Image: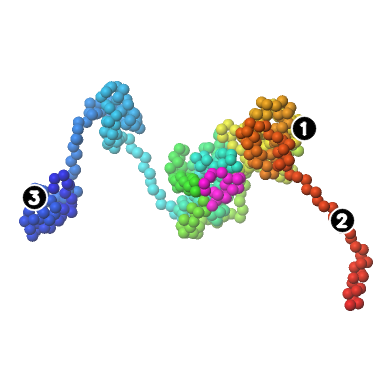
Amino acid sequence: MSGTRITDQQVRLYMSKRKHHSQEIAAAKAGISVRSARRIDRDATLPSQKPRRYWRSRPDPFADVWDTEVAPMLMSAPQLQAITILRKLQDDHPGQYPDSTRRTLERRVRYWRAMSGPPKEVFFPQQHEPGARGLSDFTDVTELRVTLAGVPFAHRLYHFVLAFSRWEYANVVEGGESFEALSTGLQNALWQAGGCPREHRTDSLSAAFRNLQDEEDFTVRYAALLEHYGMAGTRNNRGQGHENGSVESSHRYLKEALDQALMLRGHRDFADRAAYDEFLREIVMRRNRRNAAAFRLEREQLMDLPLRRTTDFVEEEARVTRCSTFTVRGILYSAPSRLIGHRLKVRVYGDRLDCYLSGALVHSTARASRAGDNRRALDYRHFIEGLKRKPQAFKGLAFRDELFPREAYRRTWEQLEARLTQREACKTMVGLLELAALDGVEAVLAARLNASLVDGRLPDLKALREELAPRQVDCPVINVEIPPVSSYDELLGKEVAA
């Protein structure tokens, strides 16, 4: 029938009916015209077996420039996009190649690449054996927009995946891609899985070191870590993330699951780091439950764990200066003033620094990252007592801006500095920081300061202290009179007589 393509089924039906009926009746039963029936009688080849004929519905608009201009451009730069070539032709030939020819050019470029373009990279699907391979990688999760107590939480995730079962583990990393973060995350994953794969694969790990010396040191420590767990280490080529595909694809699915859970939760703010860690753990466990059957098979093929974990820290030395600060890996940290002048042994973990003096743990702080050229990680609580004695030192303090725990405190200082004398502004600000240092007061006080800023008022330090500072509790005085020992003898004598 005119305008409709004849199918293989119609040809077969016509041929079967033609054995017992005339050409006209067989054609009618097959739903085709008599003219088509005559053509089938001459050649019974099925339509799907005939070569398809292509023809143009209009002249090729790029015929004049294809061999002389377009093809040479593609040969010199095969990755050129069709839209780029079209803009070039429009500049060289004004009014000759309108935007409506874009699709035609894209089809021609795509055909040229298939016929004459460079070879493309081939991806080889892998068949994973149980217990054969585990993969580690770090992934940035800035797009999740997580906040802790209203403050944006800059972090990334360490992510471990068993290739066969897709069992995974993830933990928060506040610093960069360091050996300590890799060691801590990997060991946590292995002990949670209850065994070790025979091979551990990572990317090139170039983000974990900054120079040749660091790379050599990293390589030695990483080799010792793998040897402790009896695993062979492999790496994919630099810049070829798809070679770590089992974990790279899991990044996307894990981040999608986290994002969906945050949307379902209704907000992205957490009270503290512990609450966020628990949220992440629940999401990962939920994803692992879907792979429980495959993981049970893989668990039987994992190698046994060693008797104990190996070290997941690096030990360095640092001296606490008279400013109550010390420097580790180019970042300035603060310490309690009682440690001024002492040289500390600092254990650098992936998420924290533990400081020891004569073998005793004397100070612990979160490890900072140098992302964004950040070089200071100071705790305002370590400077309160000194500033109370010298409050006017606050105005010109070199690291003053790092002492504001929240944005509300910084904005409050700007108003105090603009509207009060230096003496009064510094005294009030130090008093506010002292009040904020009390347990559980920092966030509440920040809310009070924000309310004052909205109303255009300066904070009333005396009223805030009466409201937020802990009150003295008068304990009753209880006098206990101890009876003489002879009274017990009298009681015992009465019981015997009875």
CA distance for labels 1 and 3: 109 Å
Give the farthest residue toward the right: 486
Labels 1 and 3: the sequence-earlier one = 3
Labels 2 and 1: the sequence-earlier one = 1
- 407 or 471, which is in the foreground? 471
Q: Relative to 152, is 489 above or below? A: below
Residue that badge 2 annotates: 479
- 46 or 77, which is in the foreground? 46
Residue that badge 3 annotates: 34
**For the point 61% across and 53% down, which residue is it?**
308
**For the point 39% across and 48% down, which residue is it?**
125
- 121 or 293, which is in the foreground? 293
Residue that badge 1 annotates: 389
Tell me the magenta residue range: 265-282
Labels 2 and 3: the sequence-earlier one = 3
- 228 or 369, which is in the foreground? 369
Give the farthest residue toward the bottom: 498
Q: Relative to 417, is 20 above or below? A: below
